[in-house]
Amino acid sequence: MRPLVFTLAILMLIGAANQIRSSVDDEKAVAALDTEYQAAVKRNDAATMDRLLADDFVLVTGFGKIYTKADLLEEARSKRLVYEHQEDSEQKVRVWGGTAVITALLWAKGTENGKPFDYRVWFSDTYVRMPNGWRYVFGQASTRLSNTP
C-alpha cells in the first residue's frame, strides 16, 4: 500500500509543478500579447489589433466612453492619432485558468488631428483563452492622471 501512496503523492507534486509552470507560461504569453497590442496601437496597425481583439471586445475609459473593436480599428485606419509614445510600465499579469488580467500604467503622447496630447492612465486589460488562442476581450482605463511628469 505504501508504494501506491508514495506514487500518488509524486504524481500530485508533478501535477502541481506543471500547473505552476503553465501559469507562468500563460503570464508570459499574455504579457507579450499586451505589449504587442500596445505597439500595434502606436503604429496604427489595424491588422494586428484585429487579430488580438475579440470580436465582442469593449473598452471603457475613465470618462465613461465605450469603444468597440470596430471603433478602435476605424480609429487606427483613420490615422487621426500619431503616437510618439504608447508604452506601458509597471505591468502585472494575473492568470486564473483561462482568464488573465493585466494592470499597468500607460504613457500616451502624440497628436490627435494635429493637436498634441500627453497623458498617463492606469488600465486593466482582460484576456480570455479561446480555441484560437488568447484574445483581448475587455479593457478599462482610469481618468488621466493629474501628476503627469
Image: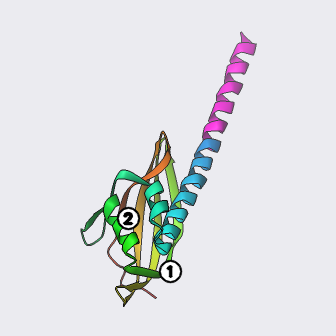
Q: Mark 2 packing: few (<14 Cα in 10 Å), some, or many (20+)?
A: some
The residue positioned 45% from the left and 72% from the top of the image is 44
Question: What span is in magenta?
Answer: 1-20
* SS of the residue under disc 1: strand
Residue 140 location, x and y as percent? 35, 63
Choose between 46 and 18: the one closer to the eye. 46
Q: Where is residue 104 shown, x and y percent of the image?
A: 47, 67
The chief SS type of the magenta part is helix
Q: Is residue 7 above or below residue 14?
A: above
Label of residue 73 in the image: 2
The earlier-in-sequence mark between 1 and 2 is 2
Q: Residue furthest left?
A: 64
Label 1 crowd (10 A; few <14 / some 14-19 / many >=20): some
Residue 72 lies in magenta, yes or no? no
Look at the image and tell me whether residue 147 can be seen.
no
Residue 41 visible in the picture: yes
Residue 7, placed above or below residue 83: above
Q: Secondary structure at mark 2?
A: helix
Q: Amino acid at mark 2?
A: Leu
Q: How many marks?
A: 2
Please say if 144 is above or below 128: below
Write down the residue under mark 1: 85
* Residue type at the position of mark 1: His
Residue toward you, 16 or 132: 132
Give me the disc on residue 28: none
